[in-house]
Image (tube, rainbow, N blue to C red):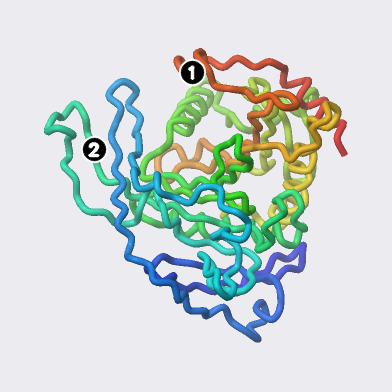
């Protein structure tokens, strides 16, 4: 399949194949000789891999109504290998990896250690036979997206041309996963840094397709619905208007996007990206919005990496970057696509720990203010 990103004049060729154990893999090529079709990525995965045996389940918490996923096989997943042993680097003689090719641009494949799977065997409807504790198979999808074949780099260092390819991969997978009957929300995210809990340092992210609406989105839908009932207006539109009117927390205002620190930021460094147009997901962005995002997003990550430089800590800054997309089904018209980017670092050499108040009862305490965070981010160019 060939996709054109008009503003960046980028051509992307998608080639789909299978790994040795049957997991799906797709190459998103933006360089020759692959993008023109002069060559293909039809490479055979010659590893001897057993068929996946994972059978994750999920149980509903009777006290909160939230689903909790159990995937004990993930205890055996690869943990902080050396660069020479990285499973996300291209394959080479004597070192066969998750990617059979000897080079790649962007690649997406099914996680070898998933917390949700496309098909699963049955489990009893109730834990211990008691209807107090419903349980079921964790049916969904967990995919890995590698942003580049270069091991010692970061998303912030990608060119807009490459970021455009990543965006197209997100779009493609969001569209495909959203069409699955059991999926209720698709979440594209990146964890960076050992402080976040990363187990592989190669620049990569993940794409989760949940069979339920996650708790944060449930609360967001409820808030947006209450706002519409009370005012007749869109919560995201009013929030954007208010942030632009105040201006204190706005970091960047573009043609299609605004970057701002939310008024009730929970983290010592937090930034949101919101499209000006009401779109539910990445697949709904037009070419102009995708093109601006391809330049804006890495620029915001570059600012983040400089955040603690005046404290003698030039980075890299650990972060979580998550694309919150509208749920599939009820509430979809109430939620606008937005990125939440935050770091657990609160100062050079110091982390923000979720202690008693945050972890115990969910009341957040922030050691700074959104206005100070925004002022610092604006100063970094």
Is 235 placed above or below 257 here? above
- How many marks are shown on the rendered structure? 2
Q: Are marks 1 and 2 in contact (CB under 8 Å)?
A: no
Q: Can residue 1 be seen?
A: no
Is 353 placed above or below 380 here? above
Q: Residue furthest bottom?
A: 38
Q: Please name the residue shown 38% across and 49% down the image.
A: 183
Q: Please name the residue shown 31% across and 20% down the image.
A: 63
Q: Please name the residue shown 73% across and 46% down the image.
A: 297
Which residue is labeled 1 in the image? 362
Provide residue 174's location: percent of width, then percent of height. Answer: 51, 54
Which residue is labeled 2 in the image? 135
Q: Please name the residue shown 50% across and 14% down the image.
A: 356
Q: CA distance from mark 1 to mark 2?
A: 25 Å
Q: Quadrant for the N terminus, please.
A: bottom right
Mark closest to the chain's N terminus, 1 or 2: 2
Provide residue 2's location: percent of width, then percent of height. Answer: 61, 74
Q: Quadrant for the C terminus, please.
A: top right
Could you say which quadrant of the image residue 270 lies in?
Answer: top right
Q: Looking at the image, which is closer to me, 268 or 279?
A: 268
* Label 2: few (<14), some (14–19) or many (≥20) C-alpha neighbours in 10 Å: many
Provide residue 146's location: percent of width, then percent of height. Answer: 59, 58
Horizontal side of residue 271 vs 180, given as left or right: right
Q: Residue furthest left?
A: 129
């Amino acid at each position: 399949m060939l996709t054109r990103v008009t503003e960046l004049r980028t051509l992307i060729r998608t080639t789909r194949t299978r790994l040795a154990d049957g997991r799906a893999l797709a190459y998103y090529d933006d360089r020759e000789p692959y993008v023109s079709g002069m060559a293909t990525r039809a490479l055979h995965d010659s590893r001897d891999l057993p068929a996946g045996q994972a059978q994750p389940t999920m149980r509903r918490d009777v006290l909160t109504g939230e689903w909790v996923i159990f995937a004990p096989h993930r205890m055996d997943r690869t943990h902080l290998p050396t660069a020479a042993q990285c499973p996300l680097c291209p394959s080479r003689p004597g070192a066969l990896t998750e990617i059979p090719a000897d080079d790649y641009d962007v690649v997406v494949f099914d996680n070898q250690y998933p917390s949700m799977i496309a098909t699963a065997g049955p489990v009893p409807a109730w834990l211990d036979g008691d209807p107090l504790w419903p349980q079921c198979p964790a049916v969904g999808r967990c995919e890995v997206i590698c942003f580049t074949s270069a091991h010692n780099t970061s998303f912030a260092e990608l060119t807009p041309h490459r970021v455009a390819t990543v965006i197209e991969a997100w779009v493609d997978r969001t569209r495909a996963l959203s069409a699955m009957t059991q999926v209720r929300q698709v979440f594209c995210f990146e964890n960076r840094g050992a402080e976040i809990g990363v187990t592989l340092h190669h620049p990569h992210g993940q794409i989760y397709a949940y069979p339920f609406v996650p708790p944060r989105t449930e609360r967001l839908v409820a808030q947006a619905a209450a706002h519409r009932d009370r005012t007749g207006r869109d919560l995201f539109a009013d929030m954007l208007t208010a942030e632009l009117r105040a201006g204190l927390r706005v970091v960047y205002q573009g043609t299609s996007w605004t970057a701002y620190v939310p008024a009730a930021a929970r983290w010592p460094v937090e930034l949101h990206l919101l499209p000006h147009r009401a779109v539910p997901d990445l697949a709904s962005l037009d070419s102009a919005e995708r093109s601006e995002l391809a330049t804006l997003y890495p620029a915001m990550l570059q600012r983040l990496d400089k955040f603690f430089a005046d404290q003698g800590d030039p980075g890299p800054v650990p972060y979580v970057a998550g694309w919150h997309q509208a749920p599939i089904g009820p509430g979809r018209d109430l939620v606008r696509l937005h990125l939440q980017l935050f770091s657990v670092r609160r100062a050079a050499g110091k982390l923000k720990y979720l202690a008693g108040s945050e972890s115990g009862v969910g009341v957040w305490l922030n050691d700074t203010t959104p206005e100070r965070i925004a002022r610092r981010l604006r100063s970094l160019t």
